[in-house]
Amino acid sequence: MAATASTMPRRDDRPPFDFSYWLQTNLLSVGKIITLLVLIALNIWIIRTGLRVNPLTTTIVVVLWAIFGGLIAYNMVRHNLVHGMLRAVKVRIYTSLHGSLISLFLLVALGLALYAFVRYITFWPRWEAVVVNFRLLMVGRYPRSLTWRPVAAALFVVVLGVASLLTWGPVSRRLYRYRKVMIGLWLASPIILGIILYGVGAPFDAPDAGPLGRVNTRLWGGLMLTLIISVIAIIVSFPLGVMLALGRQSQYPVIKYFCVGYIELIRGVPLLTVLFMAEFMLPLFLPGGLTVDSLIRVITGFILFSAAYLAENVRGGLQAVPRGQYEAAYAVGLNTYQTTRRIILPQALRAVIPAIVGQFIGLFKDTSLVAIIGVFDLLSIGRAVLGQQEYRARQAEIYLFIGLIYFVGASGMSYASRRLETRLGVGER
Amino acid sequence: MTNIENAKDMIVCRDVQKWYDEFHVLRGISTTVREGEVVVIVGPSGSGKSTFIRCLNRLEEHQEGDIIVDGIELSHDIRNIEAVRREVGMVFQQFNLFPHLTVMENITLAPTNVRRWPKDKATQIAEQLLERVKIPEQAHKYPGQLSGGQQQRVAIARALAMQPKIMLFDEPTSALDPEMIKEVLDVMRDLALSGMTIVAVTHEMGFAREVANRVMFFDQGLVIEEAPPNVLFNNPQEDRTKLFLSQILHH
Ligand SMILES: Nc1ncnc2c1ncn2[C@@H]1O[C@H](COP(=O)(O)OP(=O)(O)OP(=O)(O)O)[C@@H](O)[C@H]1O
Ligand SMILES: [Mg+2]
């Protein structure tokens, strides 16, 4: 052993670069040659396009790519080794013949996109479309004189959120005793927010409506409405979905087939259909004279839809819990409810956090579909703004702004989900 | 273990029969386990040992015959089933610890939720049990952070935390590496010597010889032969028992 170890070639005296071997590994099969041709064609196409729309950037990228490629090839042939910065470049960009060509394509594309972006930023966008219409984008046609109410509602939520973070966070143990107060406030928050936003008493435009006059939900809109719909739908559909998933496993056929039927029915139709049904058909089923606010109908549609999908996600989690867990729980004397609540659900839900959060992100973005039944969410307000003569050309700014809001919301949820997963130690136990 | 003859009946089985669809797994098992008795069940794979022991706390349902545990008949009545499960602890081949709970939570869960003991009392008893199974220092770890032998000892502590009158073991050592088998058997031996009523499926002959009052040999859903360990192991009467014993002794 010792003898062979000492005769093992060191890094520097490996056999020199072998061109025929290189050809063999890179061009051996028909598949490889075909992908190579496709890649070459793609590169010709993007370089020609690039040279036409933006010759300078394209030339710089291609020349740099060629110089580095040449340097690396030269080093390989001469020393069979690449050092330092060149090595880092090789590892990332010139992984193989095919890899180098893919890199070239992507680098040219990236260069063009970057240039376009920089040019857009330097010709400073005209954000006044967003600034002037900011109130509209945030709260829709909510009466201007009452704008303080949505602001108060937002403040209430933010303050409560920060206070909860402090109470549950590692700041001070003495804050722990306020947890009960916090929970109480959260539980009361739907009523508090309802009073602030919807109001009590006479309609706001009636002469005797106090500062908290009722504001018809038809006037609500913008980001406020998008958030209201998605937050309520998420919070209510979660327990509903869990119950549907559990019901689907029930030993009572009536419950079981009701749940299966419901889930399959909802999953079988598009969200738009559910929304139309909630908007136009629900009133037909209600006893005569009884009307339900249009916003509540829309939210109900989202809840019904989301619950069915959630149920399927949770079912996946339930199936991932081994039989032995049920058996061990029953064997120590837990009843069915305790077993589900303490043993099965915690494990099942933990396993599907990413799927559930993914679904909620989808729901958040899908709220933009309410435009079709005449509800003015963030996106439809944006389109309304673009409908005004003077802002017709400001599409980029308006859509960038709206996109940014959706992005912040969605990536916030995604981040929270990852935090939750690490907190709960998914996968390590 | 003194004077089993006069002790009261803890488990009474009369002609217990069970089918999986068409398959007749248990074909008439009758036996009585007295208080403080240690019964070891052996037999070839598929002979119905697990099925039988799982019928004793109704993890499986029998179709014919009677099973009476601590004076309570196992029927469809869920209250009876839960009453029996409170008095019967079970240890599984695969441990089946609750992976999302710490060792301490695994042990105190049932006492606080089923017996409704205050948390302090449950914790105190759990600490004593962990002492008894010799892993007091692991209380705040999660099951996934323990070795197989440690996990199985936690599982025993979890079952004992309900202060059961009967303990059921289904091949508690067969998922363990050889060096961990002893630590689990030691705990089981202590338990047996402390006077606990035990029904254990296990092929650990040393354990059976040392502490069992009786060994039952199962084959094809029937008790072929039962006797004190030295009689059954040294002088089996039935051909099937001899064949089985020769096979496991050659292993
Ligand atoms: N859920 C089930 N459905 C159908 N058949 C089953 C089921 N569980 C067990 N059986 C069958 O019943 C028979 C007895 O199984 P059991 O698990 O009781 O055997 P065992 O004596 O414990 O065997 P082993 O030593 O392998 O654990 C086997 O033939 C098995 O295939
Ligand atoms: Mg078995």
Image (cartoon, coloured by chain):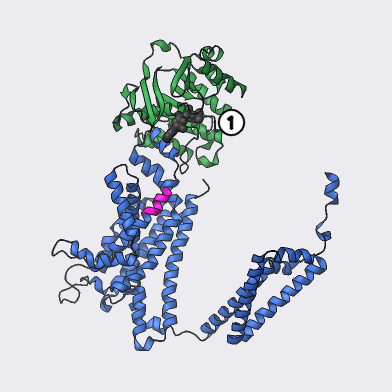
Chain colours: A blue, B green
For this rendering, which residue is in front, A260 or B147? A260
At 59% from the left and 87% from the top, the residue drawn is: A52
Q: Quadrant of the C terminus of chain B?
A: top right
Classify B85 as above or below A147.
above
Residue holding disc 1: B180
Which region shows up in magenta?
Answer: A311-317
- Asked which quadrant contains residue A70, the reply is bottom right
Q: Secondary structure at mark 1?
A: helix
How many numbered marks have been drawn onto this rendered protein structure? Answer: 1
What's the amino acid at mark 1? Met
Classify B30 as above or below A108.
above
Q: Residues within 10 Å of mark 1 (few under 14, many from 20)?
A: some
Mark 1 sits near ligand 2, with its Cβ under 8 Å away? no
At 42% from the left and 70% from the top, the residue drawn is: A406
**Percent position of residue A175, x then y:** 40, 53
Q: Please state if A341 lies on the left or on the right of A425 as rendered.
A: left
Identify the chain of the residue marked 1, using the numbered disc in the image: B
At 20% from the left and 67% from the top, the residue drawn is: A200
